[in-house]
Image (cartoon, rainbow, N blue to C red):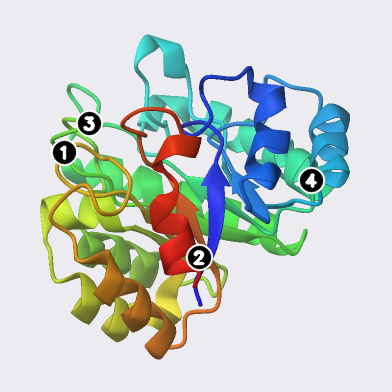
Amino acid sequence: MPKFAANLTMLFTELPFMQRFEAAAKAGFKAVEYLFPYPFPKEELAAALKANGLVQVLHNLPAGDWDAGERGIACHPDRVDEFRQGVPRAIEYATALGCAQVNCLAGKLPAGVSEAQARKTLVDNLRFAAEALRGANIRLLIEPINVFDIPGFFVNRTDQALAILDEVDSSNLFVQYDIYHAQRMEGELGNTLSKHLARIGHIQLADNPGRGEPGTGEINYAWLFKHIDAIGYTGWIGCEYKPRTTTAEGLGWLQTASA
């Protein structure tokens, strides 16, 4: 049976953020993830996790000015110092929250920067972060994101992410496989998961089109959940989708998948 984590950035948004922990627990979730913990005191987040019996399974490294449209800075040659200063901050939060893995958002290819230069910057930054996180017993992930939702995002396919893993050459770097992004860019969900399972550290989901809950689009989630079990994936699956109405009203799929 798959294990599902509520993504509190996208679920229960009808509530203030700090109230979403309780809502997730009441809905039956045992774990949570979200984009960024940094706007909140780590002690407050840790208390919310503890009070609701939740495990935190993922958050991202600092990723630049999100509200201004930045989606990561790891491939930006002029932001290396900023990126590397964010790594100990991520370690501080992840350690306080008991979060065993963090994700690196590569960012959009900057104007005037060649793909080769951006790739070298990204590889060097990932190598730095993977080793720093290893010392804190935290895994590093890198996520391909589709270029329809985020035009210009630098890492956008599984094979590209795997090639970057090869170049970084760290046993502490894995792929974050988002089913929704993968469906939009390449399909072949079942075969890709089977072939590269050992290099996939975390899975996320949403249906397509629309990025709604499972069962609202073209992806055969009933089959895919059974396949994920069959190939031996034992990690969490982050529910990073946009509910069509309220989160609670759209959770029928969760009861079916957990049955």
Q: Is residue 85 above or below residue 251?
A: above
* Residue at 34% over, 34% down: 107
Measured in 3D between alpha carbons, the distance from the residue under mark 2 to the one under mark 4, in whole angstroms, is 20 Å
Which is in the foreground here, disc 3 or disc 2? 3
Q: Amino acid at mark 4?
A: Leu
Measured in 3D between alpha carbons, the distance from the residue under mark 1 to the one under mark 2, in whole angstroms, is 23 Å
- Residue 147 shows which numbered tag? 1
Q: Earlier in the sequence, mark 3 or mark 2?
A: 3
Q: Amino acid at mark 1?
A: Val
Q: Earlier in the sequence, mark 2 or mark 4?
A: 4
Measured in 3D between alpha carbons, the distance from the residue under mark 3 to the one under mark 2, in whole angstroms, is 23 Å
* Residue at 30% over, 53% down: 214
**Towards the viewer: 211 or 107:** 211
* Residue at 36% over, 54% down: 205
* Residue at 60% over, 20% down: 15
Q: Quadrant of residue 188?
A: bottom left
- Residue 150 shows which numbered tag? 3
Query: Dot 2 corresponds to which residue?
Result: 173
Q: Amino acid at mark 2?
A: Leu
Q: Is residue 231 among the parts visible in the rendering? A: no
Query: Dot 4 corresponds to which residue?
Result: 97
Q: Position of residue 118 (x, y in %)?
A: 28, 40
Callout 2 secondary element: strand
| Contact? badges 4 and 3 (CB < 8 Å) | no
Which is in the foreground here, disc 1 or disc 2? 1
Q: Is residue 41 above or below residue 55?
A: above
